[in-house]
């Protein structure tokens, strides 16, 4: 396991590498101008320079990403397992509804910031209010989320193809304000994803949402220990773990998972 010092040093090395690449590209642009001079047509000269400037902008972006890395924490698991309660604990305030039934599919993304804002994106089939609201209280955010989730569930009963809801929140995250205590680099950006839970094995609604959004996240898995059916307990827990492990292999995750299962069967 890498120590915090090693992580920070690796980030610094990456940052220095992108800085060097930017300098290299700038020098190359000057050399091309000097070597080719008037041998290029105006259009050729413009196209080459445009490509180099695009490359330079990309390197600037990568440098900025190394300077301010993003830590993404995703809460997922089985339905009614306390995922939103866990996310609220990390945030430091109860802005996510935890007293409603599980939302069928959707994503709540909470980014650390000072604006205390909520945006409900307009999605296909939406019958609820969408838009952006600023300077909200925790209760106002929670009530808007709850109302939208309930409207989504009602609409889904008659429209199985309805598009999942996307909520984006900017909020002062308690965890992000205590970076030194958790030995995080000062420039670290913190994002918390509250994902839907798996309702059943091979959940075709929530499974894809989970796989799509936790590929680059540190995943916190919650599980409903009050489930009385022990077989269902075990199957759902395996399914949650399967969703997370599959991400390690990208698009070939399912093939890899099947290969592992076959090996188990042979042994």
Image (spheres, rainbow, N blue to C red):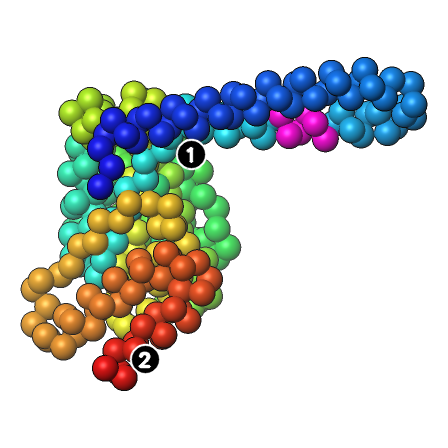
According to the image, label 2 marks what residue? 262
At label 1, counting other C-alpha atoms closer than 10 Å, the crowd grade (few under 14, some 14-19, many 20 or more) is few
- Disc 2 from disc 1: Cα separation: 49 Å
Which label sits on residue 38?
Answer: none
Q: Is residue 128 above or below residue 66?
A: below
- Say which quarter of the image contains residue 176: top left
Q: Position of residue 218 (x, y in %)?
A: 28, 45
Quadrant, the C terminus: bottom left
Q: Position of residue 13 (x, y in %)?
A: 41, 26
Is residue 52 on the magenta stretch?
yes
Residues rendered magenta in the picture: 51-56
Q: Residue at x 82, y 25 (%)?
A: 46
Magenta span: predominant SS is helix
Asked whether the viewer can see residue 214, the reply is: yes
Q: Is residue 33 above or below residue 245?
A: above
Residues 165 and 52: in front is 52
In the displayed orientation, state which residue is furthest to the front.
35
Left or right of residue 102: residue 62: right
Which label sits on residue 132?
Answer: 1
Left or right of residue 64: residue 177: left
Provide the secondary structure element on which disc 1 rests.
Answer: strand
């Amino acid at each position: 396991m890498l120590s915090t010092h090693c992580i920070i040093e690796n980030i610094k090395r990456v940052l220095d590498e992108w800085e060097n690449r930017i300098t290299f590209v700038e020098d190359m642009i000057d050399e091309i101008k000097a070597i080719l001079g008037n041998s290029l047509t105006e259009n050729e000269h413009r196209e080459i320079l445009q490509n180099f400037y695009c490359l330079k902008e990309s390197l600037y972006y990568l440098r900025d990403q190394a300077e301010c890395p993003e830590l993404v924490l995703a809460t997922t698991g089985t339905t009614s397992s306390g995922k939103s309660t866990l996310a609220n604990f990390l945030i430091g305030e109860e802005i996510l509804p935890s007293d409603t039934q599980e939302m069928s599919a959707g994503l709540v993304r909470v980014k650390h910031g000072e604006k205390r804002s909520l945006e409900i994106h307009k999605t296909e089939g939406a019958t609820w209010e969408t838009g952006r609201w600023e300077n909200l209280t925790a209760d106002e955010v929670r009530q808007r989320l709850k109302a939208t989730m309930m409207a989504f569930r009602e609409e889904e009963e008659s429209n199985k193809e309805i598009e999942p809801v996307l909520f984006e929140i900017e909020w002062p995250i308690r965890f992000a304000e205590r970076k030194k205590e958790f030995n995080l680099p000062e420039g670290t950006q913190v994002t918390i994803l509250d994902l839907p839970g798996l309702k059943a094995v091979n959940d075709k609604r929530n499974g894809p949402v989970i796989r799509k959004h936790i590929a680059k996240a540190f995943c916190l898995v919650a599980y409903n220990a009050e489930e009385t059916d022990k077989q269902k307990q075990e199957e759902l827990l395996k399914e949650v773990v399967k969703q997370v492990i599959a991400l390690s292999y990208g698009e070939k995750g399912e093939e890899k998972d099947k290969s592992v299962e076959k090996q188990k069967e042979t042994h």
